[in-house]
Image (cartoon, grey):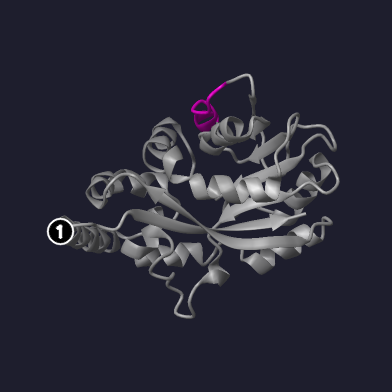
Amino acid sequence: MARIYYDEPTAAAFKAVREVPREGLWEWREAVRHHLRPSEEMTLVDVGAGTGAFAAAFSDWFDIGVVAVEPSAAMRDQIPRTAAIQVFEGDASAIPLPDASADAAWLSLVIQHIPDLAVAAQEIRRVLRPGAPVLIRQGFPDRYQPSGILRPDSIELVRWFPETARTVATFPSIADTCEAFAAAGFHRDALEQVRETHPTSLADFLGQVDHFRHADTTMRSLSDDEFLRGKERLRRAVRDAEKASHPEPRSNWLDLLVLR
């Protein structure tokens, strides 16, 4: 039911162009630290871990154990294996962990791939200890302007390829997500926007954007004409940035929804 089938070329493209470099995630580090309150012996389950960028980051930042659960074999092959990171085949509706064995759950850009969010919420409830948080990194469609186009300072891909908002609009909303998790006994604890930055330039992004089209769910929905129009917007922005003495860094804003 995933919106993309992650074979080996797609997984490699994802790792190459979709992972945000660690140095651009410091605001995520602090936001997660605030809500996770990490401590020794803590175990976090990374549901839909992808290529393991956050699994590795959490292990390094917080010195905790991470269980990375990912259905795609090609994506699992990209996850770093360390003493602190265990990697398992599974998905949100079938997490290979005992009852009440984890201290937190992390879901990054994954809820749109889950066929039944209510079933997943019950499964996450099963593996978490009482009071443990669920931290969801996501772009929620009900956080947009009434026009349906994201704010100019929000998701980078939508900035240059506004038609990608069409697909994002089909993703679970905050209300949908909270309702599904409420049925499993969770309540909304916090909701905040978190910025991530890219050390690479817009010109670098332009050079990678063809790979993005194959590795990103929203980009795959674009027609050829929509994609070419977006590339032209990006080319114009690159030209403008080259003329600027101090170009703005690339940035992206997503929501952190915390449930307990």
Q: Is residue 28 above or below residue 150?
A: above
Task: Check disc 1 and give the amino acid type.
Answer: Arg
Residue 260 part of the magenta-drawn span: no
Is disc 1 placed on a helix, strand or loop? helix
Residue 239 position (above or below residue 43): below
Q: Residue at x 72, y 63 (%)?
A: 178
Magenta residues span 73-81
Q: In the drawing, does residue 134 fall left or right of residue 139? A: right
Residue depicted at 43% across the width and 64% down the height: 154
Q: x and y percent of residue 44 in the render?
A: 70, 37
User: Looking at the picture, how far across and down is residue 164, in whole percent?
Assistant: 40, 62
Q: Which residue is mark 1?
A: 239
Could you say where residue 70 lies in the image, as x and y percent from the top left? 60, 35
Which residue is most to the front? Answer: 245
48 relative to 41 in the view: left or right: left
Left or right of 199, for residue 194: right
Q: Looking at the rendering, in which quadrant would you find the C terminus? A: bottom right
Residue 40 shows in this picture: yes
Residue extending farthest bottom? 146
Q: Is residue 110 visible?
A: no
Determine whether, in the image, residue 195 is placed left or right of residue 225.
right
Give whichever of 121, 28 is nearer the camera.
28
Q: Is residue 149 above or below residue 80?
A: below
Judge by depth and name the residue closer to the eye, 203 or 196: 196
Residue drawn at x 27%, y 61% is: 230
Q: Residues within 10 Å of mark 1 (few under 14, many from 20)?
A: few
Q: Quadrant of residue 241?
A: bottom left
Is 224 or 98 nearer to us in this picture? 98
How many labels, in total? 1
Residue at 51% x, 32% y: name it. 75
Locate residue 247, reporting x and y percent.
24, 57
Say if the magenta span includes residue 80: yes
